[in-house]
Amino acid sequence: MRRPAGRSPGRDNERKGVTVSQITTPRELFLHELGDIMYVENALANEVLPKLISEVTDEEFRKALEQHLEQTKGHLKNVEQVFEELGETPQPEECIGFEGLKSEHDKLLEETSPDLVDSVDLGAAARTENYEIAAYEGLRRMAKAMGEDRAVELLDKNLAEEKEALRIVEKISTRVANESAKAYA
């Protein structure tokens, strides 16, 4: 069995019939959480954002998504660099929370009029940005506590861009919600 980056071989848990090593140190937890956000950034860059870009109709939103796609590719490189700074091989960990956000979006999209796609996608974007912000805030705290200053710098860069992306999504969302409400009034 191959162990995830940084995990000690000492303790294992049985989950769904598969043996996984137990997280026993702050560093192991940090590496696991870093793998989670790597999974998220990779899925966003290679699957989710291109899909959203293709389905939205609002031009300002589409341009914001295209810009954020480029930022997300940089976020992924920064996360990989954090792994390397710690002497670890970058390894994504499936992020169940993010998969839940994706499932919720897909189900809602199936149940919603095509006229409301932009509103659905703006909601999904805001939820995802909040999720990423929470992840980066936790990661930077752990990195700081471990004395990993270079990791903190890289994580802070991603965090600042995620906060700005959320600000933009919220601004567009307010406009689109107002336009939609007027159109259906």
Image (cartoon, rainbow, N blue to C red):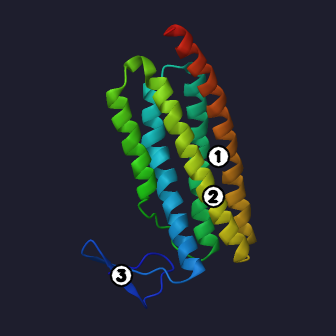
Q: Amino acid at mark 1?
A: Glu
What's the residue at 70%, 40% (across, down)? 164
What's the residue at 61%, 31% (across, down)? 64
Gap in Å between the C-alphas at discs 1 and 2?
A: 9 Å
Callout 1 touching callout 2 (CB < 8 Å): yes
- Which disc is residue 13 wearing? 3
Query: Quadrant location of residue 107?
Result: top left
Q: Earlier in the sequence, mark 1 or mark 2?
A: 2
Q: Is residue 66 above or below residue 25?
A: above
- SS for dot 1: helix
Q: Is residue 141 above or below residue 22?
A: above
Q: Is residue 56 above or below residue 11?
A: above
Estimate the x, y position of residue 24 in percent, counting from the top left.
51, 84
Judge depth for marks 3 and 1 and give the one in front.
3
Q: Amino acid at mark 3?
A: Asn
- SS for dot 2: helix
Q: Is residue 66 above or below residue 2?
A: above
Q: Earlier in the sequence, mark 3 or mark 2?
A: 3
Gap in Å between the C-alphas at discs 3 and 1?
A: 34 Å
Residue sitting farthest toward the bottom: 10
Q: Which residue is mark 2?
A: 136
Q: Amino acid at mark 2?
A: Tyr
- Which disc is residue 162 wearing? 1
Callout 3 touching callout 2 (CB < 8 Å): no
